[in-house]
């Protein structure tokens, strides 16, 4: 009898342990899957169907990734990526604003601060107008120098004659100086205009007279100034290289010096290459360290 009693007690003890293990396992599973279990209970409304109402811990649970139930979906500020018909992402992001945050009073104040719309021609005429500048006061930079807008529009046709010096190839193969007169728009910088015209080379009329230039193609005049009758001319580095050798270098210098010295305000020319004063031009070593005058080429 005592043995039987002990066996029953042992079975009861084992049963209690098993139930405790099962309860512990269920508790651990609930803690691990708590979010999934609560989300399922809330979505299926399990307690509402079973008991008629939801417990507060289920009702107050916020499912991850979903907006609160009391916030309309249209008020979310999550960006929306718009794609075109081809399916290519256009990277256009549209964000929705919560309209409840807009201050209608500030909108009304802003609207009232705007100027009243113009409703008649008289009101338009009463608005003060800024006077437009005269075409003769507007200056335009051109390859020939500075001209006025009036001249650019052809309202005033003013030209001036400049003397340009090219070279001419003689029958015996020698090269001689050739002067031509060219009419160019009148500017406030006649020396700059003349040198730029020289860099353009002979025109069709000059070619008929067998004129040519030995100034390297692509040469640009970067700046020009005159002080004490010395013209300082700053050329691009294209001016340094002449495929005709020494004769080419000497004659290109001659063309520039004679053209510049045709102005009464210039007696000599100081050559600058790309902003630097150099003593010699080209690999052949033509001296340009001091100003050159027309007597340098006699």
Image (spheres, rainbow, N blue to C red):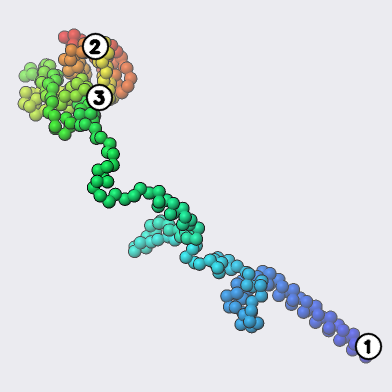
Residue 224 x/y as whole percent: 26, 20
Say left or right for 246 vs 85. Answer: left
Instruction: Look at the numbered discs 2 and 1 and tell me whether their residues touch, using CB distance below 8 Å.
Output: no
Q: Is residue 158 above or below residue 177?
A: below
Say left or right for 210 vs 129. Answer: left
Give the Cα separation between the discs numbered 2 and 1: 140 Å
Give the Cα separation between the discs numbered 3 and 2: 19 Å
| Residue sitting at x 60%, y 67% | 62
Image quadrant assignment for residue 11: bottom right
User: Depth check: 275 or 266 in front?
Assistant: 266
Numbered mark located on residue 229 in the image: 2
Dot 3: element: strand
Residue 67 x/y as whole percent: 54, 66
Q: Nearer the viewer, mark 2 or mark 1?
A: 2
Give the Cα separation between the discs numbered 1 and 3: 126 Å
Along the polypeptide, which appears first: circle 2 or circle 1? 1
- Determine if residue 137 is in view: yes
């Amino acid at each position: 009898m005592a043995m039987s009693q002990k066996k029953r007690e042992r079975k009861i003890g084992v049963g209690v342990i098993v139930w405790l293990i099962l309860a512990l396992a269920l508790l651990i599973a609930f803690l691990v899957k708590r979010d999934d279990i609560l989300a399922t209970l809330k979505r299926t409304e399990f307690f509402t169907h079973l008991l008629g109402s939801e417990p507060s811990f289920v009702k107050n649970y916020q499912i991850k990734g979903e907006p609160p139930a009391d916030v309309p979906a249209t008020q979310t500020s999550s960006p929306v990526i718009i794609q075109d018909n081809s399916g290519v992402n256009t990277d256009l992001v549209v964000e929705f604003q919560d309209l409840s945050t807009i201050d209608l009073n500030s909108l009304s104040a802003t609207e009232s601060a705007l100027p009243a719309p113009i409703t008649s021609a008289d009101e338009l005429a009463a608005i003060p107008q800024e006077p437009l500048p005269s075409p003769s006061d507007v200056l335009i930079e051109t390859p020939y120098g500075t001209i006025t807008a009036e001249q650019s529009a052809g309202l005033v046709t003013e030209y001036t004659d400049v003397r340009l010096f090219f070279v001419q190839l003689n029958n015996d193969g020698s090269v001689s100086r050739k002067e031509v007169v060219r009419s160019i728009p009148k500017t406030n910088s006649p020396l700059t205009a003349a040198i730029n015209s020289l860099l353009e080379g002979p025109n069709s009329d000059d070619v008929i007279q067998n004129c040519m230039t030995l100034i390297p193609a692509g040469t640009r005049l970067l700046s020009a100034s005159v002080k004490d009758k010395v013209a300082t001319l700053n050329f691009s580095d294209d001016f340094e290289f002449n495929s005709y050798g020494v004769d080419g270098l000497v004659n290109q210098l001659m063309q520039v010096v004679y053209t510049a010295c045709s102005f009464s305000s210039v007696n000599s020319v100081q050559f600058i290459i790309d902003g630097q004063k150099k003593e010699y031009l080209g690999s052949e070593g033509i001296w340009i360290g001091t100003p050159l005058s027309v007597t340098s080429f006699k």
